Amino acid sequence: MTLTRRMMLAAATALALAPAAAMAQETIKIGEINHYKRMAAFADPYKKGIELALKEINDAGGVMGKPLEFIYRDDQGDPAEAVKIAEELMTRDGAVMLTGSILSHVGLALSSFAAEKGYLYLAAEPLADSLVWGSGNKNTFRLRASTWIQAAMLAEEAAKSDAVTYATIAPNYAYGQDAVAAFKENLKRLKPEVEFVAEQWPGLFKIDAGAEVQAIERAKPDAIYNVTFGTDLAKFVREGTDRGLFDGRPVYGLLTGEPEYLEPLADEAPEGWFVTGYPWYAFEDGTPEKAFVDAYTADAGETPKIGSLVGYLTAKSIAAAIEKAGATDTDSLIAAFEGLEIPDTPIGTLAYREVDNQSTMGAYVGTIAIEDGKGVMVDWTYKGPDGYMPTDDEIKAMRPAE
Amino acid sequence: MAFLFAQFLTGLANASSLFLVASGLSLIFGVTRIVNFAHGSFYMLGAFIGVTLMELLPGHVGFWGAILLTGLAVGAIGAFVEMVVLRPIYRAPELFQLVATFGVILVIQDLALMIWGAEDRLGPRAPGLRGVWRIFGEPVPKYDIVIIAITPFILFALWYLITRTRVGVLVRAATQDREMVGALGVNQAWLFTGVFALGSALAGWGGALQLPKGGADLLMDFNIIGAVFVVVVIGGMGSLPGAFIAAVLISVLNVLGVTYLPQSTLVLMFVVMAVVLIIRPYGLLGREEVAGEHGQVGAPETPIRPYGTTGQMLVIALLALLAALPLFADRFLLILMIDMVVFALFAASLHFILGSGGLVSFGHAAFFGGGAYAAALLVFHTDTPMELAFLFAPLAAGLLALGIGWFCIRLTGVYFAMLTLAFSQLVWSLAFQWREVTRGDDGLVNIWPSPWLSGTVPYYYFTLALGIGGILVLRHIIHSPFGYALRAGRDSPRQAEAMGIDVKRIQFAAFALAGVMAGLAGGIFVFSKGSVFPTELEIAASFDALIVVFLGGVKTLAGGVVGAGFMTVAEDWLTRLEYWRLVLGLVIIAVVIIAPEGIVGSLRRLWTRLRGTDEEALQ
């Protein structure tokens, strides 16, 4: 029955999207493009996070006195499709700006499109560094802490250990390659004697875990840096644990502690790994972090993922920017986003840097332990991106002239 | 030595699931001639159903019982799909059924999401088989040893079934000549259903058996299908021992590749497939395809001819409407039309070799994406003016087609299709992995047209002129002597050769021309989107084109164009719905069943019937 109800709702939405809808002036619309089906495990919590924020914003009177509304569209994970939908959202549906995408390449396509057509795009989830650096432009802002920042946090911890030889394993695509390069560069700077003795590149979601574990074991590294996630991670952890790969070796895992990836592992979570993630279960009462977790759990009927937080902050950022701009034209919104500061978010004050349009959202780092048959992060801390970023001059050199 | 042996065992363990899934696909193809894209979906269903059953049934008996039951359940689902979706369309043109199986993929994806939710499921461990045994000092997981031991029994059971039972006799007979089997009084319908159910059950078992090594997730259907096709083709379509040998070969090579050439993981199996097919065109143990030599399935095709006056007037009216569109349509409609024309040209170029040439390419995106990349690379690296870079798109795609065609054209049927697939995967991996040049999947961005074309309306006319122009050129060529020679080679290569037509050379030229046109479409595409990513070279992109050609109607002239238009509009509407994949899948299946000759073919038939004219009189 949910099915029929949802279909009716969807059909109703589709009708509402018809050209020149009479409601156009009533709400402020944001175009949200994502891979709702192809990446359902990530897009669902993200969308629920947005909806929680929207509820809070609109209950408090909306923005500029009007309700804020997101139009959700599915791009099937195809950049060309995303660009087409973006055009429709902006020219036909009356959206004032664009946001969305989990996959980096779709984010990059939308970013280039926004710059060419003079729209504003807030990249919420994509991690690629080039989004705000090598391919950055003034029309694109990015919320989530990038690959570089998170890898640098792990490298800092790795530099403290005795390990000298490292093996890396990362999915064979841009994200994996960037993550390995960033880790190497940061670690070599902190500890020049470090050596990388094996680099494994399984195809994304096509890992041959047994073979990868054998190959790493053969190189006899002191420590391992892991970038695999999702089903690849589960298989790698299983084979590695069974075959004793992780015995006596520190492992540094990018994103491994995020609930999206840690929860499916249950009691097989890899104990002792040092990871970035989101320890929603460990926040203390009275903190804004805990308040968000409670509100989300009550609203969505499930515990939050990192995507929930990102979705929530996305909607909050947009609302704050529109409020600050006092208008909805692109130029005013871009001006508002630059240096935008949002106090009182679940992670404290969130700001958008003027130098590269990157937000100051950081990451949680900690060690994986097993409690009550579940993998959790312990001894965790929240770290802002300061100190892990390249200098402003380096960033300016990377960003194309504007 | 010990290490190598341990690696070999890892390869054998991986081969087990792969063999099960591949043997099912091979059986289905051998008997029903259906290239079942949905086979990966049955594998996924096996994994999900297996997880659910294992949670319900405890202990040893529960675990192995759950695996057994999973196969039966997936087999039953397979039988249902065969009876409802495939049975009505066996008389349709060859390979048409793959469109229906594509619809099945979409439906199963959404149903699985509804039933099991989005989160990945970790597979339960086999009771008592956690941990490792040490073999020559190397740790080998216990479960690996168990499935290595099980696989030969399954192979033996299948072998016994095929060679020693009456059912097996029928299956083998049908693999060799299904029409003769039907003529001898065997109920083909039930034989096909039975084989499809068995094939699906094998896929289901494959999915359930791999659970302790992995789990169940919603992407596993597409993730395994490439490897499965590779195994079936290397082994020889329809050959079970071939599938086993190929599964072991691919798995062991993969393990070695991971160790000694870690970057190779994306392409290794496609390289192996290309090499095998170039040396042995029908796979290791396959035999030359006999289908088609008995003539085409279905009613004989009416000769084609140019549109009559009415048809020409209609086309001119349509073109006039398109030309006048910017006067009254909003900007987004123009963008949608640009997308549609680009896709139509791409589909028409595939339709040209597929419909008129009988060459089913599974890798046509290599030329579309190749053209797009060629232009984008020039702009990105050398700041070449857009006009010049644009010209380079069809040129480079044509050259690429000449290169790939030189290898592929000597093959026929499904093997030709698979070799084109292998080459398109090589092109894809080049774009994906050669990051210094192509930026990998970060793609090439900021590829925008020159200022005089940057507005939507000028670019719309640019697209219209080149896109429609390309389609008309292709149509013109079909009606030229070259087109006649091409069709002669499709319908009867031997007679065509006897008449002095160099069939292979004609096909080679047509393949290259189709490459040029796909490249042209790619060129228009890249400047309209401003970026290009390896996605445009993926298998899925090739299949998109393939599906619209079949959907529009292979044996018609307008099939590709109409199919592309239909699909663009259907997707544009349906993706707004929550469960759009389910709806789109059902729409595709419905179209396939209602219009087994494709949209255009079936409309034409309806038109003839309405007019009451005989076949001769229609255009």
Image (tube, helix red, strand yellow):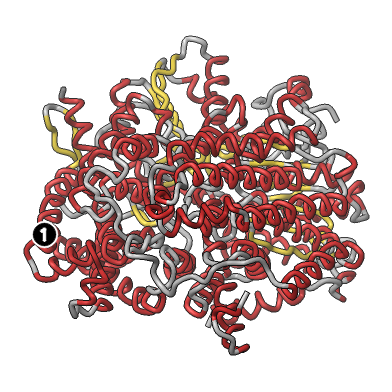
Measuring 54% from the left and 31% from the top, which residue is drawn there?
A: A179
> Where is residue A70, by image quadrant?
bottom right
Q: Nearer the viewer, residue A49 or B203?
A: B203
Which is nearer the eye, A50 or A215? A215
Q: Residues within 10 Å of mark 1 (few under 14, many from 20)?
A: few
Left or right: A303 as drawn, with respect to B212? right
Q: What percent of the width, then of the height, locates residue A363? A: 60, 39
Farthest front residue in view? B499
**Residue B197 in the image: x percent, y percent?**
27, 70
Q: Position of residue A354 (x, y in %)?
A: 82, 34
Task: Indicate whether A182 appears above or below B209.
Answer: above
Up the image or down, B610 lies above or below A348; here it is below
Give the vertical position of A290 relative to B578 (above or below).
Answer: above
Q: Which residue is mark 1?
A: B157
Determine whether, in the image, residue A9 is placed left or right of residue B289.
Answer: right
User: In this rendering, does residue A119 appear at all?
Assistant: yes
Which structural element holds mark 1? helix
